[in-house]
Amino acid sequence: MNRARALLGSFLIVIGGLYTLEVANVVDDAGSLISKWWPVALIATAVMMFFSNHRHWITPTILAVVAVIVLLNTTGTTDTVVTVVWPVLLIGAGLLILLGRGARTSSDDDRITAFAAFGGTELASHSKHFEGGNIGALFGGADVDLRDATLAPHATLDVFTAFGGTEIKVPEGWKVITHSLPLFGGVGNVTAKEMLADDAPVLDVSATVLFGGVDVKH
C-alpha cells in the first residue's frame, strides 16, 4: 500500500474515531487527547521516511527527535530546560528542510518506492524491466525520473499526493495513461500523444491528489 495514503488515511480514521467516541460519551474530550498526542503522527511519518530509504536518515531522524520532544511537551512530561530547547530544534529542522537538497536516489530495481514528507525526494530509475511502484508525497514533493528506464508489460505507478506535488518524467515514445482522483488538486499529462507506435510501451499512472498536483512530462 502507498505509505503516504496509509499514513493520512490512518490519521483521519483516528481523528474521526476519537470524536465518535466523544459523541458516544466513551471519552470526555477528544480535542484534548488530539492536542496531547498529535506528535505521534510525526513520529510515524519519520519512521516511514526512514524505511522508505534508510540511506537518507538525517531528515527523518531530526523529525523524530523533534516530534518526541514536542510529545513530551504536549503531554506535560518535560522540564523547563527541554521546554526551552525544543523550539530551537524546530528552527534547526526547518532550516535543514529549506536549505537541504533532499534525498537523491538511483535505482535499478524493477519496482520503486518513494515517500516524501515535509521535504523533497528525487528518484531516478535505470531498470530495464520497469514494472511500476508507489510514490507518496505528504506535505512535500517527489521528483521521479524514468527517462532511462525500459518498461515491462502492464507497468503501473500508484501515486498519492497530499499538500504537495509529484513530478514524473518519462522518455518520448511511451504511452502514458492516467487514472486520477483529484480532490482540490490536479493531474497533468503533457506527454506527446501523437505519432506513437502501435506497440508503444504503456505506463499506467493511478493518481490520488489532495490539495496538490501531479505532473507527467518528458
Image (spheres, rainbow, N blue to C red):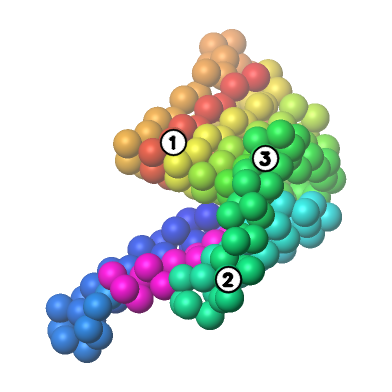
Left or right position of 118 against 151: left
The residue to which callout 1 is attached is: 212
Q: Which residue is mark 2?
A: 80
Q: CA distance from mark 3 to mark 2?
A: 24 Å
Residue type beneath disc 1:
Gly
Quick one: label 3 or label 2, which is nearer the N terminus? 2
Outermost front residue: 80
Taking the spot 80% from the left edge, 30% from the top edge, the residue there is 148
* Residue mark closest to the camera, 3 vs 2: 2
Q: Badge 1: few (under 14), some or many (20 or more) residues near its Cα, within 10 Å? A: many
Q: Position of residue 17 (x, y in %)?
A: 29, 75
- Labels 3 & 2 near each other (Cβ < 8 A): no
Farthest residue, direction top: 195
Please state, as top left, top right, bottom left or bottom right, where the N terminus lies in the image: bottom right
The residue range painted magenta reads 31-45
In the picture of the structure, the residue carrying the numbered disc 3 is 95
